[in-house]
Image (cartoon, helix red, strand yellow):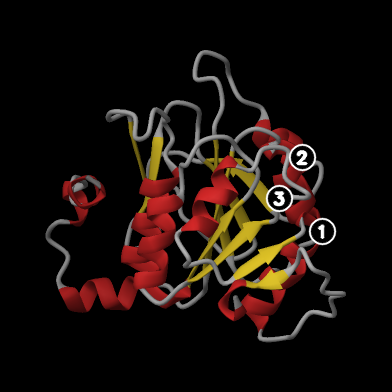
């Protein structure tokens, strides 16, 4: 499904492989998925990141599509990063955070722009973390970092597989600090999660993954590197 959606933007259909390679960004892309308890969880992660954060961030939070969202305004007051509600054609940029609007799927394109669609729900939700993660994997490859935070359901599980198959990295919030463990649990169940972390340590690991500087963490039994399991 995501492949057909990614190819639906005709404005990029005539770009040559060389042109796409020239446009391809060199920075890393962090895609974050959350649902129940997500506003507090995403806030906690973004609050840890400096304005100089070298990666771009895109957030899918399951919200009521019948009500306007002010999530960008709330998060903007809680982080040094520049937060905005995504629009069709918006660019993902280092130090910037794009929020998927309620009721719209968000896909990342090879030229670092995003596409918004109102196609059918995936696993009963729109926006879909799976579609976002799959597009991130297809366009950023090993530079994609997927983060699955608190939430009900299994959205994000398939997207985690796509990111790992493309050589990217996956983080899941641990059960102890999750308000709802459905989404992180589904991600962990794939066996493809690199880090299972308490919420308070996710930001430090993102900084390490994007800068190469190892975080100083007190790793407890609930903050394990999944690859060692």
x, y percent for residue 160 = 44, 59
Q: Residue 85 placed where, x, y %?
A: 56, 38
Q: Of label 2 and label 1, which has the lower sequence position?
A: 2
Apparent side of residue 176 relative to residue 19 in the rendered image (left or right): right
Q: Report the residue marked by disc 2.
A: 40
Label 2: few (<14), some or many (≥20) within 10 Å? few
Furthest-top residue in this view: 66
Disc 2/disc 1 C-alpha distance (Å): 11 Å
Which of the two labelled residues, at mark 3 and mark 1, occupies the earlier sequence position?
3
> What residue is at 44 percent from the left and 35 percent from the top?
127
Secondary structure under tag 3 reads loop
Residue 63 appears at what percent x and percent y?
56, 26
Residue 214 in which image quadrant: bottom right
| Residue 210 image point, x, y percent | 62, 76
Q: Which quarter of the image is occupied by the N terminus? A: top left
Instruction: Judge whether 38 appears above or below 53 on screen.
Output: above
């Amino acid at each position: 499904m995501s492949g057909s959606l990614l190819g639906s933007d005709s404005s990029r259909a005539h770009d040559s492989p060389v042109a796409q390679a020239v446009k391809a960004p060199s920075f890393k892309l962090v895609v974050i998925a959350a649902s129940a308890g997500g506003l507090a969880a995403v806030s906690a992660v973004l609050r840890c990141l400096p304005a100089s954060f070298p990666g771009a961030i895109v957030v899918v939070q399951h919200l009521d599509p019948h009500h306007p969202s002010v999530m960008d305004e709330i998060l903007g007051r809680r982080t040094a990063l520049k937060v905005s509600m995504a629009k069709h054609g918006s660019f993902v940029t280092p130090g910037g955070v794009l929020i998927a609007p309620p009721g719209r799927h968000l896909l990342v394109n090879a030229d670092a722009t995003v596409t918004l669609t109102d196609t059918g729900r995936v696993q009963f939700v729109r926006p879909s973390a799976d579609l976002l993660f799959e597009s991130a994997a297809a366009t950023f490859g090993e530079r994609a970092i997927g983060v699955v935070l608190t939430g009900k359901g299994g959205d994000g599980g398939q997207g985690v597989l796509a990111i790992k198959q493309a050589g990217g990295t996956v983080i899941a919030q641990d059960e102890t600090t999750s308000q709802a463990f459905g989404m992180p649990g589904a991600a962990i169940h794939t066996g493809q999660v690199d880090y299972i972390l308490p919420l308070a340590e996710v930001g430090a690991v993102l900084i390490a993954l994007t800068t190469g500087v190892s975080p100083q963490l007190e790793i407890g039994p609930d903050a394990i590197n999944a690859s060692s399991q």
